[in-house]
Every structure is written in C-alpha cells, then in structure tokens.
Image (cartoon, helix red, strand yellow):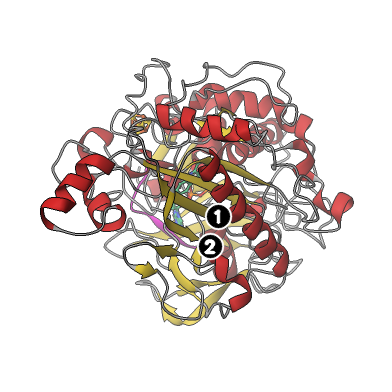
C-alpha cells in the first residue's frame, strides 16, 4: 500500500524540536504516525566532518532543499541614540555600513531534526516567573499553564535527550535531578568565572543536551566546541538522534523526508487531509484522525495562512492571531583579547551560565530578563582563518608571530534577552515572492521597540563589564541584533491561551476551533522568557500534547 492510501492516526508536519518530540510521544503511546519533513536526513558521521582542512570555512552543511526561503520586510532606521549597539570589528570597522537594520540572518536548517541539528544544545527550563508576564507586568500574555504543570514533561524530555546540568536553581525547582551530572568548566569559562566573582555575580553549570559521559547508546562529548556545525559524535541531543531514533524503533512512525506540506484541508467540522509535494513536484494527499503542525514559528503561520477554509482566511485563524505576536532573538556578543593564553578554542560553547538577570524584574527599571554565557564558539572565533581575518592585524612575519602569540586568547561573552510582542512584529505572506510550488513565501516583519533596545543596552554594557573584570584588555569585536535581524530563537505566532479570542491554541496545543488540529512548536509561546533557550520547553509541551491526543483517541473523543 502506498503512503497516500494508508490511514494514519496522526500526521506530524515538521520534524524539528517540537515535531520530533510529538512523533515520538504518539508512536510510544501506540498510535500510527506519518511524519512529513521538507528537508533531508543528515548522517552525523558523514556530513559533519570536522577533520577536513576546510572545517573552519564550512558552516553547517547544505543538502538539497535544506535552506528555508522567506522574505524580510524593510527594517527600522538606525539612530545615533543607540550608536553603542552598532556591530563592529577592530580590523574591518562597522559591520553594517547602511543606516537601516539589515535582515541577513534567519538560518534555520530544513532537515530531519530541524533546527536542533545546528543548535548549541542548551536545554533550559523556563524561569517560572516568566510565564505570567501579562498579569504581573502588563506585557505579552500569560501562559495558560504553570511551571509545575510542565515539570513532569520537562523531566521526560530531559531523560530522552540526555540533559546534564546543575540541580540548584530557585527559579526552576526540580523534583528530580538532571539525568546527567554537569560538565566541567573549560579554562576560558573559569577565567570568566573569576571576573563574575569580582562583580558579585554567579556562574553555574549550564543545562545542556550534551553528554558528559556515555548515555543511551551515545558516547560522551570530546569538547571540540563545534556544535553549531553539527555534532559528529551524536552526543549532542539533536532531535534526530534522540526522539526520532526512538520513534523509528517503535516501527509505528513512518518518516518521509523531502516532503513539503503545501496545504491542510478541512470540512465544516474537522481537518480532513494534508497535501504535500516531493522534490520532483509530485503531489500527494494523506489523511489521519489528527494533524500536528510543527514547522517552526515562521513556517507554521505561513502554512496555516496558506490553508484557507470556506469561512476563514487562514486555518485556525478565528482570533486573527495566526502570524501575530512574533518574537525574535534579542542578543549581544562582545569579544576581546586576554593577555594570557586561555585556549578558548576548546571546550563546550556555553558550559556555564549567569542567570542573575534572568527573572522578568531582575534588571532595574526594565521589564524582561536576560542571561550571559561564554560565546567564543557562537562568534566563531575558534580557528586560525577567523583569527587572521578578525583578531590579529597586519601581515607578513609580524602577523605570523602575533598569530602564534594571540591564538586561543579571545574571550567572548554573549547575552540573550527577553523579546516582548507588539503589533509591528509579525509573520505575513508575500504574494510578490513565490516558492517553487507557486505559493507566497513567509514575510517577516520586525521592529525593536524602546524597551527591547534598553534591555539590549543593558546586555551590551554588562558583557563589556564582565570581559573587563575577567582580564580582557582590548575589545576587538561586538555584534548584536540592533543592526542585524537575528532569529535563532523565534516564538509567539500561534499563541496559546485560555481565551479563544486572544489565542490560537489552548493549553494542550489544540486549536480552539479545530479539535483535531494541534500546533507543537515555538509558535505557541505567549512570551519568550528571559533568554532561556526554547527547545526543552517546546519538547515538554509537545510530549504533553501527544499524550493528550493518545488519551483522547482512547476515549474516542478524537
Ligand atoms: C544556530 C542555532 C543555535 C541554537 N541553539 C539553541 C540551543 O542551544 N538551545 C535551544 O533550546 N534552542 C536553540 N536554538 C533554537 C532551536 O533550535 C529552535 O528553537 C527549535 O529547534 C525550534 O523547534 P521547532 O519545532 O519550533 O522548529 P524547527 O526545529 O525549526 O523545525 C521545523 C521543521 O519543520 C520543517 N518544515 C517547515 N516547513 C515545512 C513544510 N511546509 N512541510 C514539511 N516540513 C516543514 C523544517 O524543515 C524543520 O525541520 C538554536 C537555533 C539555531 C538556528
Ligand atoms: S563539543 Fe561535544 S556536543 Fe559539541 S560537537 Fe563537539 S563532540 Fe559534539
């Protein structure tokens, strides 16, 4: 029987952080699942080789259709008031010459495992105070569930992914310890810790989906620091080697790569089918009792907006909020030269973290939190080519001598902060730019408001202060999302909530209107948190939703 003739209990669209966890949860509970993924499968042993001479020049590898296409609307003008937030390098000068914010970075890979393939591996629970932003501070929206409702789902996600970390954190109380102990801090990280201690700030082991020792058939980390290029050992808990590996083992999850969903069909009462195309353009239609959308916070609203119903423009858009409330990544990285050799090319990208400003009221006079980590890997200041171009000035013999002296001395500290929703940041469709199937691309609209810029100024000032206290004598480069749009973490475009007029899905990630339609990616976040990385929360919500679906099916309510 071909897939199109087969009847499934559930179709999951997208195999990233959320889709993979949902597919596993559904298959584990005995349901038959069709998982449709637009991108291809990556083989960590073949595709992520760091042993070639070109390792530093290769970013995460590209495969057929692994780039996502989108448009970015004209972004805001840059002003002198925020001049201290411009990106610059001490050799090449200002990174953005124009006086308008540049939209060059929305880099989410399309592949089996989605953005977790090139994620850094931070596996954070949300600060429990970050989930009531509206009732406490009058911004964003409240989550329709509490931290304690997510606790057991966090535990389950941590067990499957293999999360290591410290168990002491008053803002993220735990009923069980992390499945794995924390990683030891690298020498560079210890150097920053000394700086933080001088400032009276804390530095705790980060919660990471990276194995400090063998676990669940995967080996421990070798501390090569290149997680964003794809982990060649499978110790980083990307969704392909964790949830999807387990989902396939149930033999109830049919994974189809290279299948792009174009439309979700419905009748008056329910979702009836999913229409998708393969890489040659052949079209298929499959149906199932439930459909779970997990294409990420940019592509999920696009797919829903493309899937009109008789009554409504945009599927599940009864509230008019599909695509609205887009939250992007507010970030800053400062890099500087330390006078001593600290071997900063080695280690894990962010083995430790400072959570001191993470609570929504932790920064004086600014709503919304942020956090700080080592960011030398994120800045890609790991190999000799980047050192020669961005760190060490000059040429010839002197340049070579300086390279030898300064290699491994760069310290970078980065911060990610809360991004709050407002009406000017949203995802729409661009009828003037079509994909290969003739469908409008997603158009990203983004504006940073004054609150966000004030928060970013705090983040930048604190990064500089931490570097100075850690012994850095000269800043060499800084960049952030004031003059370049960035969206490694994106949220909010199909917000969850209790009120159908103010949200798209309920606390089970179920559409208020279409009972057999679920959304299980970062689109459902009502607020972003104070710099927490989102994947673990996405996965906890997705498993919770999958178990809810299985229960409803058992009771014949779906
Ligand atoms: C460089 C980088 C570093 C990051 N570091 C971290 C980190 O350390 N910790 C953390 O928690 N988060 C991190 N993130 C963010 C994290 O990876 C994402 O937030 C998370 O993976 C989002 O999960 P998702 O399910 O919402 O979407 P994604 O993981 O993006 O998955 C969406 C999937 O849907 C597929 N898809 C899209 N449209 C269609 C369609 N029409 N039909 C079929 N399939 C489709 C895509 O191909 C993709 O595989 C990082 C992201 C990047 C880019
Ligand atoms: S540092 Fe560890 S997790 Fe990251 S790519 Fe290297 S081996 Fe994998």
Please state which of residues 272 and 73 is positioned toward the viewer in this rendering: 73
The stretch of residues the image draws in magenta is 256-264
Q: Judge whether residue 28 is colored magenta.
A: no
Work out whether residue 36 can be spotted. no
Q: How many marks?
A: 2
Q: Tell me where residue 117 appears, x and y as whole percent.
A: 39, 42
From the Cβ of disc 1, is ligand 1 less than 8 Å away? no
Work out whether residue 221 can be spotted. yes
Mark 1 Cα shell of 10 Å, populated few (<14), some (14-19), many (≥20): many
Q: Tell me where residue 389 appears, x and y as whole percent.
A: 25, 57
Q: Earlier in the sequence, mark 2 or mark 1?
A: 1
SS for dot 2:
loop
Report the quarter where the N terminus lies. top left
The CA distance from mark 2 to mark 1 is 6 Å
Report the quarter where the C terminus lies. top right
Q: Judge whether residue 263 is colored magenta.
A: yes
Please state which of residues 427 and 183 is positioned toward the viewer in this rendering: 183
Please state which of residues 433 and 411 is positioned toward the viewer in this rendering: 411
User: Label 2 belongs to which residue?
Assistant: 481
- In the rendered structure, find residue 331 and report the number of the disc placed on it: 1
What's the residue at 44%, 46% (across, down)? 473
């Amino acid at each position: 029987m071909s897939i199109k003739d087969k009847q499934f209990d559930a179709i999951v669209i997208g195999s990233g952080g959320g889709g993979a966890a949902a597919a596993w949860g559904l298959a584990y509970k005995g349901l038959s699942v069709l998982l449709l993924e637009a991108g291809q499968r990556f083989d960590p042993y073949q595709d992520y080789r760091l042993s070639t001479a070109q390792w530093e020049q290769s970013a995460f590898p590209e495969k057929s259709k692994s780039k996502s296409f989108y448009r970015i609307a004209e972004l805001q003008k840059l002003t002198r008031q925020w001049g201290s937030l411009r990106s610059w390098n001490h050799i090449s000068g200002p990174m953005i010459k124009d006086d308008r914010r540049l939209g060059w970075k929305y880099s989410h890979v399309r592949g089996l495992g989605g953005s977790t393939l090139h994620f850094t591996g931070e596996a954070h629970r949300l600060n429990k105070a970050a989930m009531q932003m509206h009732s406490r501070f009058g911004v964003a929206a409240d989550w329709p569930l509490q931290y304690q409702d997510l606790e057991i789902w966090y535990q389950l996600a941590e067990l499957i992914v293999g999360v290591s970390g410290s168990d002491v954190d008053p803002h993220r109380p735990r009923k069980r310890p992390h499945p794995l102990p924390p990683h030891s801090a690298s020498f560079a990280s210890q150097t920053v810790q000394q700086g933080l201690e001088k400032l009276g700030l804390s530095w705790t082991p980060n919660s990471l989906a990276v194995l400090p020792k063998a676990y669940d058939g995967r080996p421990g980390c070798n501390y090569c620091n290149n997680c964003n290029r794809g982990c060649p050992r499978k110790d980083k808990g990307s969704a392909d080697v964790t949830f999807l590996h387990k989902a396939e083992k149930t033999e109830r999850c049919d994974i189809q790569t290279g299948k792009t969903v174009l439309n979700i069909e419905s009748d008056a009462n329910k979702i009836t089918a999913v229409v998708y195309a393969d890489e040659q353009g052949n079209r298929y239609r499959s149906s199932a009792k439930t459909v779970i959308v997990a294409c990420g916070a940019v592509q999920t609203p696009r797919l829903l907006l493309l899937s009109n119903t008789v009554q409504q423009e945009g599927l599940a858009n009864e509230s008019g909020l599909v695509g609205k409330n887009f939250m992007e990544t507010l970030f800053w990285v400062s890099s500087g030269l330390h006078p001593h050799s600290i071997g900063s090319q080695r280690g894990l990208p962010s083995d430790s973290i400072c959570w001191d400003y993470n609570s929504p009221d932790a920064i004086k006079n600014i709503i919304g939190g942020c956090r700080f980590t080592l960011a030398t890997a994120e800045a890609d200041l790991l190999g000799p080519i980047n050192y020669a171009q961005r760190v060490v000035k000059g040429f010839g013999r002197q340049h070579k001598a300086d390279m030898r002296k300064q290699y491994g001395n760069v310290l970078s500290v980065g911060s990610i902060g809360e991004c709050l929703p407002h009406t000017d940041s949203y995802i729409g469709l661009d009828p003037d730019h079509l994909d290969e199937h003739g469908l409008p691309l997603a158009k990203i609209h983004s504006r940073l408001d004054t609150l966000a810029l004030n928060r970013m100024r705090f983040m930048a000032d604190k990064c500089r202060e931490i570097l100075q206290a850690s012994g850095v004598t000269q800043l060499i480069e800084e960049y952030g999302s004031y003059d370049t749009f960035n969206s490694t973490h994106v949220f909010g475009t199909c917000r969850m909530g209790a009120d159908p007029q103010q949200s798209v899905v309920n606390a089970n990630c179920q559409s208020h209107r279409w009972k057999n339609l679920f959304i299980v990616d970062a689109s459902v976040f009502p607020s972003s948190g104070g710099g927490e990385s989102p994947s673990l929360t996405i996965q906890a919500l997705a498993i919770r939703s999958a178990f809810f679906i299985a229960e409803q099916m058992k009771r014949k309510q779906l």
